[in-house]
Image (tube, rainbow, N blue to C red):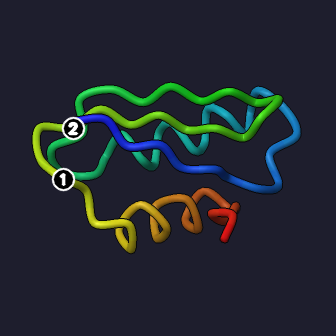
Amino acid sequence: MQSTFTVTGMTCQHCVASVTEEVSELPGVTAVAVDLDSGRVDVTSDAPLDPGAVAAAVAEAGYELAS
């Protein structure tokens, strides 16, 4: 399954790495692709993801999902 989210506040490759690392640790996630310019985060997973869990992982990295 693929889910797409938009993350606000990312400004550099370190931001991308932080978000990728935190979201990758969610159960069932098999791939994470982050586009810095658009803030788009594509997450591939074995099962549907809980948006709250994704938001918490993004927050742990120091950013937030766009509403």
Q: Which residue is drawn at 28% across and 66% down?
A: 50
Find residue 65 and report its horizontal and vertical position in percent. 62, 63
Residue contact at pointers 2 and 1, CB within 8 angstroms: yes
Few, some or many residues within 10 Å of mark 2 (<14, 14–19, 20+): some
16 sits left or right of 12 in the view:
left
Q: In which quarter of the image is residue 44?
A: top left
Q: Residue 48 carries which label?
A: 1
Q: Give the residue type at disc 1.
A: Pro
Q: Quadrant of residue 2?
A: top left
Find residue 60 and report its horizontal and vertical position in percent. 55, 65
Q: Which of 5 and 24 is in front in this view?
A: 5
Task: List the residue tagged with mark 2.
Answer: 45
52 sits left or right of 28 in the view:
right
Find residue 55 and report its horizontal and vertical position in percent. 49, 67
Q: Give the residue type at disc 2.
A: Ser
Find residue 54 and report its horizontal and vertical position in percent. 41, 60
Q: Which residue is drawn at 18% across and 53% down?
A: 48
Q: Is residue 54 above or below residue 44?
A: below
Count the marks.
2
